[in-house]
Amino acid sequence: MRDYFSSIGYEMPHYINPAEYVLELVNTDFMRDREKASQQLEQIQSSWSRSPNATVVVDAIEQETTSEGRDIDIGHHSANPLTILLALLHRNYIKSYRDVIAYGIRIVMYVGLAILMGTVWLRLAPHQKNIESFTNSLFYGGAFMSFMAVAYVPAYIEDRSQFIKERQNGLYGPSAFIVANFITGLLPLFLIAIIFSVLVYWLSNFRPDGDAFFLFVMWLFLDLLAAEGLVVLVTNICPIFVVALAAIAFANGLWMSVDGFMVQPHTLNPFWRYVFHYIDYQAYVFQGMMVNEFGKRTYACETLPGGSCQCMYSSPLESQCQIAGTAVLDSYGYRTDRTGLWVGILIAIIAGYRILGWAVMYLKRH
């Protein structure tokens, strides 16, 4: 810069900020002699257009854009959608690593909840007196895992605010943002599900089987994905922290009320059952966890002083002073052969939340 301006008659003094010097040359707003200032500015512009430097720069730009197949017009730059997505993912992962609010605080919260649950429901024996405790623990874990997703609201509002600015600059649209946001959350949410399960599952003494443990992880992971999708949708509709927080808390309270634990599905009021129960992601998580725990496990009945047995649930194992876990499932109306269906419905709900979130962003022009 110093050499170039010297070559056109403007010697830059020593020990001066080059940017400030150039601003003084080209800024005509505060010049006393406006005519002289305009002539000076015109001379600087014409000197550049005639200089070899300008030719080199223009040739370099044309060569670069031609070789990469990019379109460059005034005010428009089209880029490969995959390149945009990868750039957003790279930035999101850096932000997630550095931003304690996005996932760090949530991991601490979930670990705290896991320790709380594991020590409250500690080493429950497979006895009929603990059947209700097992059921309560499954409901509590699934419901509060999703409820605590409200902690993601401030981080998402920040990301959304950044998106609005970059969308106005024409850098990318809501599709890239929603897809990148979803992919970024997969790994942290899976790690949360694993950490939570390791602590809770074995402390509480759920069905001691490797397959059952990983099914438990799967249900929690799907639960977290759905809960985060709900956060994205509600916050896009109303990106005000307090309002979004209240709306998401209300929605989770609704899902907890109609998921089949408070009132069993077959006795639930028809309005709540047909309007909300069947689109309640927590309902499918609770059903899946119940089948995972009770589908292949037996529980000891109460032995009376005379040696006879008293079983809370009637099952084919009653003569052996035991209860088949399927008897517990029958009381809720849950079948053991619908796991695939429930997983499919949960995936559809997760996709539905994200698509609706995308639609809101697409329709809201800021």
Image (tube, grey):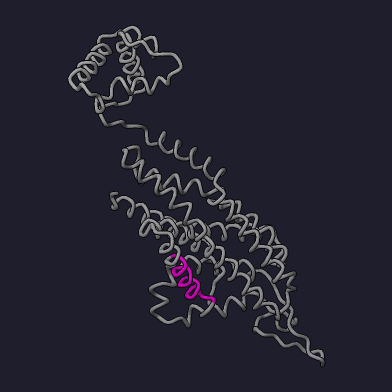
Using the image, determine if residue 65 lies above or below residue 133: above
Marks counted in the figure total 0
| Residue occupying the far left of the picture | 35
Q: Is residue 250 magenta?
A: yes
Question: Where in the figure is residue 307, as x and y percent of width and height?
Answer: 81, 89
- Observer-nearest of 348 and 146: 146
* Coordinates of residue 277 in the picture (x, y in percent): 44, 72
Residue 62: x %, y % from top left = 31, 17
Does 51 sit left or right of 261 as displayed? left
Front residue (pair 33, 23)? 33
Quadrant into which the N terminus falls: top left
Which residues are the magenta region?
Answer: 248-261
Q: Residue at x 23, y 13 (%)?
A: 43
Nearer the observer, 44 or 195: 44
Q: For the point 46% across and 81% down, which residue is it?
A: 268
The relative height of residue 292 versus residue 193 in the rendered view (above or below) is below
Residue 167 location (% of width, % of height): 33, 42
Considering every residue shown, the one lying at the far front of the view is 32
Residue at 34 percent across and 37 percent down: it is 171
- Please identify the residue farthest to the bottom as the structure is shown: 306
Is 146 displayed left or right of 174 in the figure?
Answer: right
179 inside magenta stretch = no
Above/below status of 178 relative to 352: above
331 or 235, which is in the foreground? 235
Classified by dominant secondary structure, the portion drawn in magenta counts as: helix
Does residue 306 appear to the left or right of 327 in the view shown? right
